[in-house]
Image: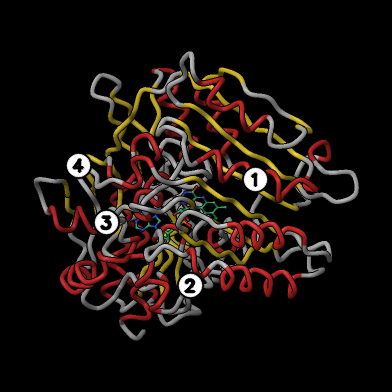
Amino acid sequence: MSFDSIAPAATALPEAALHNFEHELVGSALLPRHNAYAAACASFERSVAHRPALVVKAGASEDVSAAVRFAGDHGLGVAVQSSGHGACVPADDSGLLLSTRELRGVRVHPGTRWARVHAGARWVDVLNATSRFGLAPLHCGALNSSAVSGLLGGGIGPLSRRYGQTADHVEEIRVVTADGSRLVTSAREDSGLFWGLRGGRGQLGVVTSATLELVPVPVVYGGTLTFDPADTQKVLTRYAQWVADVPDTVASRLSLRRLPALSAALRHANDPLVLQITVLDVEPGPTSEALLSPLLGAAPIVDGSLDRMPYAAAARDWDEPGQPVATLSRALVLRRLGKEALGAIASFAKLRGGHHFSLTLHHMGGALARRAVLPGAAGYFPGAEFALRTAVHLDHTQGVRAALQAQEALRTELAPWVYPKGSPGFLSGLDLGPAAARMAFGPSWDALRALKDLYDPTDMFRYEPSLNAAYGH
Ligand SMILES: Cc1cc2nc3c(=O)[nH]c(=O)nc-3n(C[C@H](O)[C@H](O)[C@H](O)COP(=O)(O)OP(=O)(O)OC[C@H]3O[C@@H](n4cnc5c(N)ncnc54)[C@H](O)[C@@H]3O)c2cc1C
């Protein structure tokens, strides 16, 4: 057991109860006065500042139920954080922040193609454990984010067009509910809760582990192509035409970023703006080269090429920049884009003023458009062609106001192409109202509310953008 000793209480929490609680933990409990408190609160998304009454750094799954019971006994809400890429609602002084970031265990069963992942296991941990068997999980883009958070939000990544969302390929989820019960949920046991967890975000309980399906994907054909940003309109137009006919095995994403952290080699001479298409055929064959070659002719290639590579290398290509950032982000699921929509996206990138931003247009369709065999609350997206995510980076103060205005203007301009449902995992701190949550959860909304009434009637898990507003907290 390792724990920080609790200093005389500077909080309303009774000291004796804190001491007893601390002795129950494998991990540690931290009050605001402790040196390690700030680091334990820190999120990858630095625009969100958690300031809870107490942080519990879970050292084992048992700490999760102990923390939930302690919170229940003392009237605290519970916020959960793994790496904090998806941090939206800060925990306040009526909350306990449960940090799962040290629970990074992964156990692979290559024969049955399942991996059991603990609450804090990141996609990079899962990929490292599975790639030597030629297997991969249905992971999200950011490899530093946790697999459990991915499945709670749906989970869209480079394998989704071929196989579907993370949430729809789960065998079992272990969860601690608001009353401290530890439940093993699956299609056979507590199947309603099992459904709701897979896309309902973290509002129904704290997941301690999940068993995820793995898919065989040893080698792929693809790569990242970098273009001159002056060719944005041309490349966007070619890309939007090209995706219309590609088979489900081909995944792709177009990104535009102006970020200080990007390698100087990738920046255009006068403007550190980078335009890239990342593409891969997950079942490479004789036709792969011909399938992907139209992208090479979209405009002159500044850097990059297409080749066969191990899947683990392709997954790193899809990864997001690895340093913690402060951003305000927006996401939209979109129908097939018209000429005006492509023009609006290209104009967003043209804004002058040196503002730092990222924009990603992720091709959807394929298995994402079809009902899964074992569907979860994240739903599916027939007729949706892209997910668009924009983020304005706040660290570089120059031009931030103009960039935020441009981000909102882009949403307005794209309104005619907006799909009637979003992805719960993409909700951000700008989406705290009920309209955004209803849109993200779409047809699952009523059933999720019924599950919330059943499993968390006092709204213990209230640090979520979604049902916060709906419950009037
Ligand atoms: C730059 C960027 C790129 C992204 N790209 C993609 C993408 O390609 N595809 C995609 O699907 N999503 C994407 N997302 C969304 C991302 O997958 C989610 O935000 C993900 O949940 C973040 O994982 P995390 O481990 O950092 O979670 P955290 O930020 O630690 O937690 C996110 C949410 O999950 C809840 N939560 C975390 N762990 C638990 C648990 N054990 N039990 C209950 N609730 C829990 C938290 O309460 C919190 O609300 C992206 C986000 C960012 C910022």
Q: Nearer the viewer, mark 2 or mark 4?
A: 4
The CA distance from mark 1 to mark 2 is 23 Å
Taking the spot 49% from the left edge, 68% from the top edge, the residue there is 416
The CA distance from mark 2 to mark 3 is 20 Å
In the figure, 22 relative to 272: above or below?
A: below
The CA distance from mark 1 to mark 4 is 34 Å
Residue of label 4: 373
Of helix, strand and loop, which one carries label 1?
loop
Mark 3 is on which residue type? Leu
The CA distance from mark 2 to mark 4 is 30 Å
Mark 1 is on which residue type? Pro
The mark that comes first in sequence, 2 or 4, is 4
Q: In the rendered view, does 66 fall on the left or right side of 353?
A: left
The CA distance from mark 1 to mark 3 is 28 Å
The mark that comes first in sequence, 3 or 4, is 3
Label 4 Cα crowd, 10 Å radius (few <14 / some 14-19 / many 20+): few
Label 2 Cα crowd, 10 Å radius (few <14 / some 14-19 / many 20+): some
In the drawing, what numbered circle is on residue 431? 2
**Label 2 near ligand 1 (CB < 8 Å):** no
Residue of label 3: 197
Residue of label 1: 321
In the figure, 170 relative to 429: above or below?
A: above
Mark 4 is on which residue type? Val
Q: Position of residue 7 (x, y in %)?
A: 50, 69
Of helix, strand and loop, which one carries label 3?
helix
Q: Position of residue 88 (x, y in %)?
A: 49, 67
Do labels 1 and 2 touch, CB within 8 Å? no
